[in-house]
Image: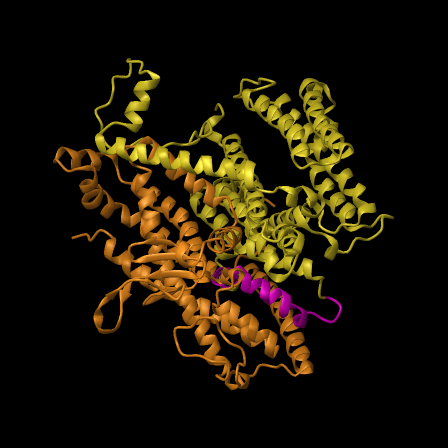
Chain colours: A yellow, B orange
Amino acid sequence: MTALPPGSATTPPLRPASPAPPSVQRSWAGVLRQELFASRGDGLVSALLILLILASAVGLLRWAFGQAQWAVIQVNTTLFAVGRYPIEQQWRLWLLVVLVAALSGLSWGLLRAFPRADRSGELWPFNDRLAVALLGFLAAWLPAALALGFPLQVRWWAITGLLVAMRWIAGHWGRSWPPRLLKLVPLSWPLLYLLGMVLIAGGLGMSQVSPSNWGGLLLTLLMASFAILLSFPIGVVVALGRRSDLPLLRWSSVLYIEFIRGAPLITLLFLGQNILGYMLPGGWAPDRVWRAAWVLTFFCGAYLAEAVRAGLSAVPPGQLEAARSLGLSMPQALQRVVLPQALRIALPAAVGQFISLLQDTTLLSLIGLLDLLGTARTVMANPEFLGKNAEVYLTLAVLFWCCCAALGLGSRALERRLDPTHSPA
Amino acid sequence: MSGTFERIPWWRDRRVVPWIVQAVVGLVLLLVISLLVGNLVRNLTGAGLLLSWRWLGQPASFDVAESLIPFDASMPYWRALLVGLVNSLRVIVVGLVGATLLGTAVGMASFSSNGLLRRLARVYVEVIRNIPLLLQLLFWYFVVFLALPNGTAAFQLPGVVVSKSGLYLAWFAQGFSWQGPELVNGVWQAPLRLSVEFTALLTGLITYSGAFIAEVVRGGIASVPQGQWEAATSLGLHWSASMRSVVLPQALRVIVPGLNSQYISLAKNSALAVAVGYVDLYSVSETTLNQTGRALEVFLLLLGSYLIIDLLISAVMNGVNQLVQIRER
């Protein structure tokens, strides 16, 4: 029940117990006794906690497999996934999923084919085998649990198969591919994002799909990714501005950051929905969805600026002075010396900000947009599914938890990869 | 170039360039702001909604479900907004106290000698932090509190009754006599009744902020050198005594600044009350906007109120910070 994932930091008790001599191999039961029943008080607490955990686990399982009626999720999967996206245009979203899966597999395989110098360069490390097993399990179990039709199930199997196949191909033969081709891979991600926008919104000969028809997971992911991508440059520029010697730059940055951070997000969304329309020339005001997207972007930008600022102040001033004395201009010194170090330090805080932004997209449901939570609330307003709150909210909670935890894991992996102290000198 | 000194061109002169940069940035900002404000003034004038505060005195003509100060629909808008502000402050203050207690307990539990308790504390923090607050609030309200039984079936503890219609607590009744909740004609009566909306919001805010505060407390305790524990134990102090009188006072120096930002985010998060139907400042503002159309004024009031709340919290916490810092002699 309380098993932790490998690598997570469990803090040892600071209580100075007499340390066991390191050579003594303690048995499994010995560890258990030391951890749970070291003293009479500990034993009592442990017994109570074990009872509590068992009772809640049994209660939850009995509810999930007995009373709960999961039909509300199974019937509405399309609604939860893409909202009211027109059904005859949904092939565009499938195409996008296929492209993302292929490119993910390719990038993943190439990462393993070109290991960092300090790595063993194992082609299939344990974590990767675990991830593939997990993907396989998800592909087999999830479509069945959601009671998708057989053709849809086959599609998910094929997409998962494509991802794993690309991973395998790139991992095995990636080293022998021409370098010019390999250079295209990192470039293809932003291209894919733009292509994805076109596929979702329409253009290039495809019919337009109005943003008011986007919904569910599609809208949530789109809003979060849009705000994350665009808030990054805003955050860096504003953080540099806040640390600038020029008073005008500094004060305007401070004003922006404090204005955004002083107000709850919901009041800023209120500003976007009710006042922004008055502030722009007639016809310029974007659609309600895009207004919310821009508010999220500027909101995230202010918080990100604080994270980047902390990173900038952690870089010793000697770095900038050394770069300047080597003859680099100010922009060059920032771009090549200071920012790479600052951004690496700011990475954990920035990812934390992105995770909280992904969670904040649920606030869109309060201003009447149909993001994942908004869709859920409309589904539950349907008399057919009245009172199915527990099933729907629990499903959403698990979904959000998995997304956020995965982002956190990814961030820790990236941190290790970027950590210069881990690579050989 | 050798031997001759060239005049530095003006675009590389360190006395000139900063001014040029500032002038350009200032000009762009001025242009954007004047465009936005100009449009705002023009459009609002056209709609007859230009900044005016006279509507604050008109009768609100909507009712508020719960209020600490007397209010009815015939009272003016400013009074309704004040009711909202008082309700917001109520949930913020109670939430701050509750979240601090919970967070401190969980933060200390992550240093317990009991391995199970330690891991449970981690699991709690990891679960809460990765689920959106709004989802948690809706869960507490719709799934937990609205599913509670009512009347005789309600959960009863000595002095506390939890039911679908709210939380009933024992408190001093008239004449300072202690009085518990009692059932009168199938309806609970108690000196202190908290509405179910308030209780759900409070539970959600406390469990959510508690997880973040637990991390702050854990970081603070971890920052105290191990030697302090060892010294306290060698003086014969128990775990609880060394925590209370040796470690926690030192950890507070690290904890208090972290608490400040968590308190401010709790205050801002309280605006999500609107999702569970608790009438806080934001919820009253939304109703006011729908009735009057005064978007700009309502927004400015909201912004100002939350700014003042933030500043108040910061001021108090700065005072606390001064108290817990080491005094050098």
- The residue at the point 73 percent across, 27 percent down is A162
Observer-nearest of A94 and A30: A30
Quarter assignment of residue B33 = bottom right
Q: Nearer the viewer, residue B85 or A413?
A: B85
Q: Residue furthest right?
A: A205
Where are the magenta residues, as a range?
A: A255-284
Q: Is residue A259 magenta?
A: yes
Residue B311 seen by the camera: no
When the figure is inspected, residue B208 is found, relative to residue A31, above or below; the finding is below
Quadrant assignment for the N terminus of chain A: top left
Residue A147 placement, left or right of A414: right
Main SS of the magenta part reads helix
Residue A246 placement (x, y as % from top left) = 50, 60
Residue under the image location 44 percent in, 48 percent down: A313
Q: Residue furthest front?
A: B185
- Across and down, in percent, residue A422 comes to 47, 27
Q: Position of residue A219 (x, y in %)?
A: 67, 50
